[in-house]
Image (spheres, helix red, strand yellow):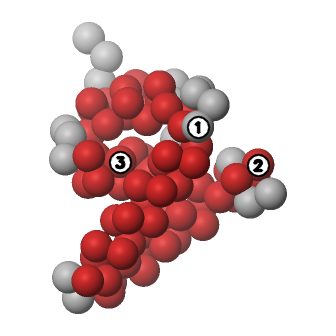
């Protein structure tokens, strides 16, 4: 049986990016990993994941959870660095 860590090793997203997808979509992390891996290989997937993280940041700020918003901002920065065509 494959573990979450095994699947993460095969995924083109970081664990934090997967957790942001799970948070946004209200999914278990393993399901978010599968969904994220699918999305990252579609034409609009990278933009969709970026949008999810941005939504999570905004939601955290509205809830007054600035610490989590700052964490998600670092997740977004990593995502943008590892997927540079999004910044163009």
Q: Position of residue 16 (x, y in %)?
A: 41, 54
In the depicted view, which residue is nearer to us: 48 or 27? Answer: 48
**Location of residue 58 (image quadrant):** bottom left
Image height check: is 17 above or below 65? above
Q: Position of residue 5 (x, y in %)?
A: 37, 32
Q: In terms of sequence position, does the residue under pointer 2 or pointer 3 come before the other?
A: 3
The quadrant in which the N terminus is found is top left
Image height check: is 38 above or below 25? above
Is disc 3 placed on a helix, strand or loop? helix
Mark 3 — residue?
21
The label shown at residue 44 is 1
The quadrant in which the C terminus is found is bottom right
Image depth: mark 2 or mark 1 in front = 1
Is disc 2 placed on a helix, strand or loop? helix
Mark 2 — residue?
85
In the depicted view, which residue is nearer to us: 31 or 25? Answer: 25
Image depth: mark 3 or mark 1 in front = 1
Circle 3 crowding by C-alpha within 10 Å: few under 14, some 14–19, many from 20 = many
Give the distance between the C-alpha atoms of the residues marked 2 and 3, in whole angstroms.
Answer: 20 Å
Residue, x 27% and y 32% (percent of image)? 30
């Amino acid at each position: 049986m494959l573990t979450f860590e095994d699947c993460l090793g095969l995924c083109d997203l970081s664990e934090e990016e997967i957790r942001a997808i799970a948070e946004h979509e209200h999914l278990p992390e393993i399901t978010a990993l599968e969904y994220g891996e699918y999305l990252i290989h579609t034409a609009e997937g990278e933009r969709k994941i970026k949008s999810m993280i941005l939504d999570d940041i905004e939601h955290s700020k509205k809830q007054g959870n600035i610490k989590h918003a700052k964490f998600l901002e670092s997740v977004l920065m990593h995502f943008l660095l590892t997927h540079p065509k999004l910044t163009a």
